[in-house]
């Protein structure tokens, strides 16, 4: 009974993701059309006259009514055509395929770094609430989240590259003299490992350190905070007390019973942090000349590059919907409170 | 000692409607037992002072340029130095407090109210209300949030109101989801059914008995969001979509100052950056402190 | 795999594995540039074909470095040692020689017989004709630029034989020959072009967009859009002396502070186009070599829009011209990197030099007096707009102007306009009442500047300035030889009118500065404001 209702919920969630996608397509379409500026003027380039602008408007299909444009756009989407980007002159799909791995590699590296620091910090704080350790954890993580990422990034570049000279030049994913490893995953670090090329691996990793640190500093606080909160709640719950009373060692209780149960809200938070980070790293990408989709989106937005903005948002949205869906499903399957009536 | 006082407070607070004096006593307890929260309250006091009285406190006109005082490092005359147009950075940092606090408070209040209302309605009534709100949140959440904010401000125009709206919209789902989760879990709980049976209307039950339970996690979220709201505005400034010059605003000052770091004029970005950090910091710490006050779980 | 295919498909062949060991061991280049030059630029290249619709300005550098034109400008050395192009001296690039017919209505070019495209096929007059036909037929910017030189129709171009090419003029114009040396009339392989043409795309723009085929000094080794472009030297180039660097890597670094850090630390050899402040400081500190020259025929101006009420009155415009804090703007927005364009000696120009200082300087009393004669003596409110893309100088300038105008009762509110919208509202719709503008003409004559910015309907006349006499003067002088006795008096009259009517109030003539490592030499400043890497070389020890 409970099992079948959970399956139904999972199925329902899958079906529910569809309206969200449609919503995104509509909102993105309308948002790009509301952007100021005329792409035909932009596309026509300097010194274009009224006639050539009108020609271009026609060739871009911008002389048609909005509903017509929308129908055409849907038709293109259905055939997998995301259009051509004005700002880079490439098919949007190509851009996304080449740039998405760069952004994902950076985001995941940052999250990994963040989790390895924040999780122990959170647990430490939860086991010693209101002591100086707890307060210090709070201060440190809070300080991290309180700085704008572009400021942290530039400060790190200034200190570690410009003054000390220990970090590599902030010029994208690889040093200029290196060639990217053969593409398997699109992650330079992984690809270099697969190609058994330690030099390239080291170089790719070195380029990652500063931007990933910048982003990680920013994501420490929510993860540590949620870990601490969830751990505190679990540690105060009856079954942990029972386990303690049953004579299990503090370590076992902490790591097996408490942590496992506390991870649920932490995973939910991670999902949110991931989507937030992927969106926020547009600024970090700009500082580090990182060729990801974030920096691409900024450029596209500033020049009213409709196809690029739409393609970018759609790709991100698909990513997030999938992620949220997975988290929801995991949550539904695991959480006893959801699903069982009463 | 620590454990003692915590359990004391816990036993004193089972019923959230016990009375004002208990609440105040608890506030006192939290502030004295947790020095960090005390610091947060002090910082908030400073921020509020700057926001309210800032313009009359500062030594210089924050907009007045000077050709002789361009890019001077911090000194006794100019505590935080001067910027590229010879304006006093200290005066600009202090005066900016009002605008930045206004942006963040307005944005968070908007999304808090709207999100809480939508979310608890969805969770309590379920059905199509739930579906509509759920899809709305999914749609917003599926956007890369900062890019959505960029898009909204770019499309609607570069004004303070639009920055507030954009920030409110991207934060709305967080509140809506939390409120919904709590409401849906508790709508069939015994104490809620009891309240309904004793003749309370649905809305009243929702507002008085269900919603307060959603407050603690939402307070934590609000505390984080206050800071994020300012950072969001700062990020928009960094790409040129922020507050209009010459209005002093921390984000835009950091963004512009960041270009001067490499050339050695660190004070341009550092001091507004510190102010920004201080404000975000204060809100985050306050959020924790507030949770200690309202969250019954925390004190067992 | 996908990425590789994509790159290969884009015609940017990946460097073969044999290059790998060389690359990895070449960390030494950082110490002494001998082989590879690394350049940092701010902006993104979006096409390898200038003629294509939608190609942006930064992409013009590909045309400069990878393609040849018939002619090019010679260079000259300024008193401070900076090398700049010389508008008055032309030399052949693909052309070995050329002559103007006796009647002055055609020009015949003899091509260098040993010029070949990268694929080995010789460059013939047919290629030149095909390329010129392309430029005048595709529409948009290339066609407009060709038209400025009186080149309108394919019938004007004739391939006499393989190495002889002739242009028939529709009218005599002093702009025709210089217009052949701007980036637009570059020569592509017509063989490749015809092979790749389709009914929908008769000029093969989609092909050349990613796969250039020229005869220029550098070939494209790879192009990673939004990241970098890598040039390899074409050892068979005959357009000029063989470039010193075998490879050139152009990296896009969007953050200005990062570009400065990179060149100061020596990780890039050249940071192209650095802001005035960085230029001045690096020069003073000696942390990098800064080379810059005033951009010919270019002015940063405050433009008033004559369709808006207060600015219809000439005295209001003059009052504003007297209210601006020129020196402060020059110090704090231009950091002294420019030529002063205020405080001219007289309202009657003594020469036809352009640009030249306008006869205004900061004089608040005079400004108030002028304003008091108008219905707007109690002041008014007006938005002051600038392009977000030029915020580096635009923002401080706007703030200082705001302060200056405040002193005569004009309340300006500052409006930053994002790039996409800027062209639309400022130049196409021309509906910004008061704004900063920075047009620069490629062809260096005053009449050319006036043609673009003082004639009703002209793109850069964002002031909507409409004056019958000015229009007539521009028409009469645009094609007239500068040696004609009628020329100078007419130009003086034009300048005098610009002085008096001041729809555009000049602030300063900007510099284009670039910073490079001290062991780099050969940087040349061009009117097209693109990095020309063909003459870059290691400095002599």
Image: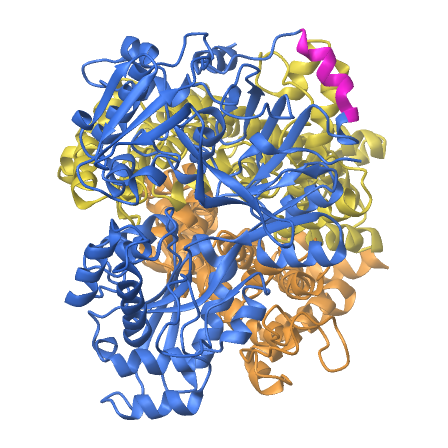
Chain colours: A yellow, B orange, C blue
How many numbered circles does the render carry? 0
Relative side of A49 to A65, left or right: right
Left or right for A78, reference B66: left
State the residue at coordinates (42%, 23%). C94
Residue B189 seen in this snapshot: no
Residue at horizontal 24%, vertical 89%?
C374
Asked whether residue C168 appears in the rendered view, the answer is yes
Question: Where is residue B230 shown, x and y percent of the image?
Answer: 54, 59
Q: Which one is in front, A5 or C263?
A: C263
Indicate left or right for C69 with C143 as reference.
right
Q: Please say if A182 is above or below C90.
A: above
Viewer-proximal residue, A158 or B202?
A158
For image coordinates 53% across by 22% down, the residue present is C218
Q: Which residue is outermost to the front? A: C102
Q: Left or right of B224: which side holds A329?
A: left
Magenta-drawn stretch, dominant element (helix, strand or loop): helix
Q: Dividing the picture into quarters, in which one does residue C465 lie?
A: bottom left
On screen, residue C158 above or below C252: above
Residue C256 higher or lower than C230, as above or below? below
Tell whether position A232 is magenta: no
- In percent of width and height, residue C161 lies at 28, 13
Residues in magenta, as a range: C18-28
- The C terminus of chain C lies in quadrant: top right
The quadrant holding residue B195 is bottom left
Q: What percent of the width, then of the height, locates residue A333?
A: 51, 24
**Residue A117 image position (x, y, % from top left):** 75, 38
Reply above or below: A273 against C227: below
On whether residue C21 falls in the magenta region, the answer is: yes
In this rendered view, identify the residue nearer to me: C453 or B158: C453
The residue lying toward the viewer, choosing from A269 and C362, is C362
């Amino acid at each position: 009974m409970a099992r079948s209702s959970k399956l139904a919920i999972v199925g329902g969630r899958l079906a529910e993701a569809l309206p969200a996608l449609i919503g995104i397509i509509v909102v993105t379409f309308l948002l790009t059309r509301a952007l100021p500026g005329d792409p035909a003027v932009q596309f026509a380039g300097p010194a274009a006259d009224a006639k050539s602008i009108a020609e271009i408007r026609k060739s871009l299909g911008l002389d048609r009514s909005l509903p017509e444009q929308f129908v055409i756009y849907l038709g293109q989407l259905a055939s997998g055509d995301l259009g051509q980007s004005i700002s880079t002159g490439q098919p949007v799909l190509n851009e996304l395929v080449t740039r998405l791995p760069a952004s994902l590699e950076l985001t995941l590296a940052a999250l990994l770094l963040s989790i390895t620091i924040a999780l122990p910090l959170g647990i430490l704080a939860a086991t010693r609430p209101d002591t100086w350790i707890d307060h210090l954890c709070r201060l440190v993580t809070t300080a991290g989240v309180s700085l704008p990422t572009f400021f942290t990034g530039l400060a790190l570049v200034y200190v570690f590259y410009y003054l000390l000279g220990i970090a590599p030049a902030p010029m994208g994913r690889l040093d200029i003299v290196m060639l990217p490893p053969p593409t398997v995953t699109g992650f330079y670090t992984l690809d270099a490992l697969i190609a058994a090329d330690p030099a390239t691996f080291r170089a790719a990793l070195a380029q990652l350190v500063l931007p990933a640190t910048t982003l990680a500093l920013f994501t420490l606080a929510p993860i540590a905070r949620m870990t601490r909160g969830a751990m505190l709640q679990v540690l105060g719950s009856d079954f942990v007390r029972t386990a303690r009373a049953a004579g299990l060692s503090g370590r076992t209780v902490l790591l097996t019973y408490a942590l496992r149960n506390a991870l649920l809200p932490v995973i939910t938070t991670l999902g949110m942090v991931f989507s937030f980070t992927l969106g926020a790293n547009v600024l970090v990408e700009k500082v580090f000349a990182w060729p990801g989709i974030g920096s691409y989106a900024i450029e596209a937005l500033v020049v009213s590059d409709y196809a690029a903005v739409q393609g970018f948002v759609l790709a991100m949205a698909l990513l997030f919907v999938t992620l949220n869906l997975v988290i929801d499903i995991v949550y539904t399957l695991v959480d006893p409170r959801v699903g069982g009536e009463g | 000692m620590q454990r003692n006082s915590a359990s004391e407070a816990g036993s004193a607070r089972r019923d959230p409607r016990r009375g004002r004096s208990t609440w105040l006593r608890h506030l006192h307890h939290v502030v004295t037992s947790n020095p960090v929260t005390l610091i947060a309250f002090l910082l908030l006091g400073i921020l509020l002072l700057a926001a309210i009285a800032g313009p009359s406190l500062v030594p210089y006109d924050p907009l007045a340029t000077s050709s002789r005082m361009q890019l001077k490092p911090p000194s006794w005359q100019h505590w935080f130095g001067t910027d590229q147009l010879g304006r006093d950075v200290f005066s600009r940092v202090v005066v900016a407090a009002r605008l930045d606090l206004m942006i963040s408070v307005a944005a968070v209040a908007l999304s808090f109210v709207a999100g809480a209302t939508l979310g608890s309605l969805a969770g309590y009534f379920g059905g199509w209300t739930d579906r509509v709100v759920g899809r709305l949140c999914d749609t917003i959440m599926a956007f890369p949030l900062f890019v959505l904010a960029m898009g909204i401000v770019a499309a609607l125009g570069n004004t303070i109101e639009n920055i507030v709206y954009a920030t409110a919209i991207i934060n709305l789902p967080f509140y809506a989801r939390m409120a919904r989760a709590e409401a849906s879990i508790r709508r069939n709980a015994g104490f809620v059914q009891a309240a309904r049976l004793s003749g309370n209307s649905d809305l009243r039950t929702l507002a008085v008995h269900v919603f307060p339970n959603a407050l603690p996690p939402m307070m934590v979220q609000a505390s984080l969001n206050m800071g994020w709201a300012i950072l969001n505005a700062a990020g928009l400034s960094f790409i040129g979509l922020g507050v209009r010059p010459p209005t002093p605003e921390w984000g835009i000052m950091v963004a512009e100052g960041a270009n001067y770091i490499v050339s050695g004029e660190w004070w341009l970005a550092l001091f507004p950056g510190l102010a920004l950090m201080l404000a975000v910091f204060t809100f985050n710490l306050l959020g924790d402190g507030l949770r200690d006050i309202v969250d019954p779980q925390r004190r067992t | 795999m996908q990425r590789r295919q994509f790159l290969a498909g884009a015609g940017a062949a990946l460097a073969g594995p044999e290059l790998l060991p060389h690359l990895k061991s070449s960390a030494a280049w950082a110490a002494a540039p001998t082989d590879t030059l690394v350049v940092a630029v701010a902006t993104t290249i979006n096409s390898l074909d200038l003629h294509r619709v939608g190609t942006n300005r930064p992409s013009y550098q590909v045309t400069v470095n990878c393609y040849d034109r018939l002619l090019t400008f010679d260079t000259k050395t300024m008193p401070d040692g900076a090398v700049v192009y010389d508008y008055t001296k032309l030399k052949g690039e693909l052309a070995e020689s050329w002559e103007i017919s006796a009647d002055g209505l055609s020009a015949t070019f003899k091509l260098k017989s040993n010029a070949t495209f990268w694929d080995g096929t010789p460059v013939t007059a047919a290629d030149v004709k095909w390329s010129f036909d392309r430029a005048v037929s595709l529409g948009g910017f290339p066609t407009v630029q060709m038209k400025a030189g009186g080149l309108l129709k394919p019938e004007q171009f004739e391939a006499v034989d393989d190495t002889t090419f002739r242009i028939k003029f529709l009218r005599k114009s002093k702009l025709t020959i210089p217009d052949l040396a701007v980036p637009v009339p570059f020569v592509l392989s017509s063989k490749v072009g015809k092979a790749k043409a389709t009914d929908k795309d008769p000029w093969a723009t989609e092909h050349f967009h990613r796969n250039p085929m020229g005869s220029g000094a550098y070939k494209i080794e790879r192009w990673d859009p939004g990241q970098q472009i890598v040039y390899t030297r074409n050892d068979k180039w005959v357009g000029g002396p063989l470039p010193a660097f075998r490879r050139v890597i152009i990296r896009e670094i969007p953050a200005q502070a990062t570009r400065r850090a990179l060149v100061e630390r020596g990780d890039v050899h050249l940071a192209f186009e650095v802001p005035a402040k960085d230029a001045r400081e690096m020069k003073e500190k000696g942390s990098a070599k800064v080379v810059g020259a005033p951009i010919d025929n270019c002015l940063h101006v405050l433009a008033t829009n004559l369709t808006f009420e207060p600015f219809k009155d000439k005295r209001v415009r003059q009052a504003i011209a007297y209210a601006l804090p020129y020196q402060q703007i020059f110090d704090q927005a231009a950091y002294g990197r420019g030529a002063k364009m205020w405080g001219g000696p007289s309202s009657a120009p003594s020469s036809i030099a352009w640009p030249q200082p306008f006869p205004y300087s900061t004089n608040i009393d005079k400004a108030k007096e002028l304003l008091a004669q108008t219905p707007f003596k109690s002041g008014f409110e007006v938005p002051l707009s600038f392009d977000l893309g030029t915020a580096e100088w635009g923002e401080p300038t706007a703030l200082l102007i705001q302060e200056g105008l405040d002193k005569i009762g004009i309340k300006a509110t500052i409006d930053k306009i994002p790039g996409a919208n800027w062209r639309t509202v400022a130049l196409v719709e021309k509906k910004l009442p008061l704004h900063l503008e920075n047009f620069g003409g490629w062809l260096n004559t005053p009449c050319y500047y006036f043609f673009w910015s003082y004639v009703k309907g002209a793109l850069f006349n964002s002031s909507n300035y409409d004056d019958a006499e000015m229009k007539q003067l521009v028409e009469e002088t645009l094609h007239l030889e500068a040696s004609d006795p009628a020329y100078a008096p007419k130009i003086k009259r034009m300048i005098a009118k610009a002085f008096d009517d001041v729809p555009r109030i000049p602030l300063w003539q900007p510099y284009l500065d670039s910073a490079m490592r001290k062991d780099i030499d050969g940087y040349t400043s061009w009117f097209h404001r693109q990095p020309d890497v063909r003459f870059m070389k290691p400095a002599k020890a």
